Image (cartoon, grey):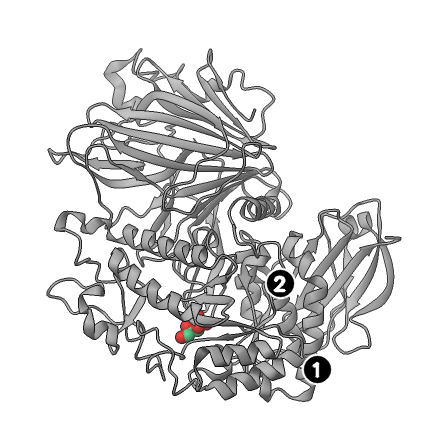
Amino acid sequence: MSITYLEQERIFRLDTPNTTYLIGLVGTEGLLGHIYYGRRLCSARGAELFLRTQEHPYTPDTNARERVAIMDSFPAEYSGHGVGDFRESSVRVRDKNGCSGVQLTYLCHEIYDGKKPLEGLPATFGGEREVTTLVITCEDKALGLLARLSYSVFEDTDAIARSVCFENGGGDVLCLEKAMSGCLDMDNRDFETLTLHGGWARERHMERKRLGHGKFCVSTLRGETSHQEHPFLALLTPGTTQTAGEVYAFHFVYSGNFIAQAEISQFDSVRVVMGINPEDFCWRLLPGESFQTPEMIMVYSSAGLGDMTRCFHRLYRKHLIRSPYLHKKRPVLINNWEGTYFDFDEKKLIDIARESAKLGIEMLVMDDGWFGNRFDDNRSLGDWQVNEDKLKGGLKYLVDQVNALGMKFGIWIEPEMVSRDSRLYREHPDWALAIPGRQPALSRNQYVLDISRREVRDYIMEQVFSVLHSANVEYVKWDMNRPLTDLAGAALPADRQGELYHRYVLGVYEMQQRLITEFPELLLENCSGGGGRFDPGMLYYGPQIWCSDDADAIERLSIQESTAMLYPLSSIGAHVSVCPNHTVGRVTPFETRGYVALAGTFGYELDITKLDARDAAMVKRQTEMYRRFNELVREGDYYRIASYQENHLFDCFQINDSRKERALVFFTQVLNEPNRRSRILRLQGLQPDADYQIRQVDMEGEELLKDTGRTVNGSVLMEGGFPFERLWGDFRCRLLYLEKAGE
Ligand code: GLA
């Protein structure tokens, strides 16, 4: 079993294949202390020493007069608030007297095979043989509060999923002002932090820095995960690389306001907390009610960042993404957004579909502009009726025509929003978020619907369902194009307005669940102005997320590198678009754009009827390449070889099949340099004693694969490397295909 309670030592031991996590009980009151998290231990014997209860100031049982000093240095498993521990609290509760102290102590525990779902929330899952769960119930007697700390360990990946469920077991109302999903205390080891930051069209760039005294946090208050910050924080031992060093990684399965924080205390211990951002959060718990926090994932690796990446990929593929498309080749799609923007009609779309079908594209996605009076982005959100002036013959006619060409059909929606200029807003102005007496702030000329309200969700889903039922729609792109502001819900009483941000996120989840329940075969791609809501929570509902509105191949190298550090490539929405690129004006070779998009879901976002003959021929070759390699990209193991984000010159990553017999190696020379010899880069994860035949993808030759005439031993490729020759020009990419010789 992978979770045990060692009764004599009063230690909970949690094991994943390569890690151990230990929690200890201390003293008569049952303080819950964090003992150890790291490489797997043979035995926990003697590990309670890490609680330091044998040294000054000892324990409350032996040194009651110094309780404050004890609480402020004790490695807490889940920190309390206001009663002696001055580091970051994990929970804060306002009681009927207006006081806020909390101290949770052990009450009982339960260990079981499997994992229960979290009601209304996305969460990892697994069968009874795949995951084991420990629930430690703690209490605060003074408040009448119960907290169930839940830990699930997976048999096949080094991840632990944590969450907390609070229950008001007393007779008075409690206000939960802060409810972190987890907390981790340990000694500092000169840790560096790794976090992801960005903005619209340049999401999730990596930042690494030394963690100093005080607090370092990433957070958002935008009501969605955000383009700016990502709910991810990792602590790395100094000098950690892709292949060496210790990594403690934390990722939040949630799509709204979050905080991830690391703090170094006076005694050089580190405390990490992660959870819903407590700012503007206040949840009223009536007697008998409970509150479930979202889930936080912890991954530890002693073998560098690459190993961490593959743990996350395994976890998300096997235990988070539920879509029937997870292990299926997704249709190569063409989206008309950058091709036409709002300027299209049914003829134009059918022309695009006709040309696309000839070149191996399999699905047409009709983006924004098909409903109401949506001729630009100033109006009609909320009016989910097909504009039959624009689409003559209606949606069914269009879809039937597209289907007759052998193409599937997909559609864009933005269900959480309403335009000021819309029938919906005129009829239900109170359905938009707005603070009484204050004009709500517009963004892209639109307001946010209060989807915490059931009637609003019902109305919107009814409209959307009726569109989707009216024709053979097989894909939906669900967009969300502005952050939340003016938080006030007309249906909530004053003392519950602090619940609105979270209730909004629960509303999103409920709507998405309804959508995939009603249309179980639907391919759902989430989106938020590109990658503003790219998070594990959304992946629970749809298997892919549009990664960024920036489809420039070079900017995408960085965005996709950081995204792929946590998420499987099969979840990363990536398309080939035209040049000069619409976001940065850069001109890159059509080949390069195809290779970059191949490392994602793959598709096109351009007016295919306007391509010249060379580019059109290349589309045909690229779709052939996608069919040839998609399984490897979708299911393979990902290895980062070189980072353009770090070196500003070139980029390289590799995908191996699970048997290590086949590999794809993507090398991009971003900037050419004069008078350079080849770059020797070391490959990873191959069989050291196997020889590999090396071929390269050829976009213009007779065959897709061209022999390089080289067969190289796996150990040579890994220990010595492979010389990537200098390519002529900037933004050039080489794609190598390695196959075990004799296979
Ligand atoms: C967002 C999306 C784009 C496109 C537009 C349409 O910006 O990210 O891909 O769908 O909305 O308005």
Are circles 2 and 1 on residues that touch, CB within 8 Å?
A: no
Mark closer to the chain start, 2 or 1: 2
Element under label 2?
loop
Instruction: Give the number of the disc on residue 617.
Output: 1
Question: Is residue 630 toward the left or the right of residue 131 in the image?
Answer: right
| 396, 448: nearer the viewer | 396
Determine which quarter of the picture holds residue 482. Answer: bottom left
Q: Is mark 2 within 8 Å of ligand 1?
A: no
- Vertical arrangement, residue 384 with respect to residue 517, above or below: below
Q: Quadrant of the N terminus?
A: top right
Query: Percent from the top left, x then y, of residue 23?
Result: 44, 24
Q: Amino acid at mark 1?
A: Ala
Q: Label 1: few (<14), some or many (≥20) within 10 Å?
A: some
Q: Position of residue 263 (x, y in %)?
A: 37, 40
Residue mark closest to the camera, 2 vs 1 = 1
Q: Which quarter is ligand 1 in? A: bottom left
Residue 372: give x, y in percent of width and height: 33, 79
- The picture quadrant where one finds residue 179 is top left
Provide the secondary structure element on which disc 1 rests. Answer: helix
The residue sitting at 73% across, 53% down in the picture is: 683
Callout 2 crowding tier (Cα within 10 Å): few <14, some 14–19, many ≥20: many
Residue located beneath label 2 in the image: 599
| Residue appearing at x 37%, y 82% in the figure | 387
Label for residue 666? none
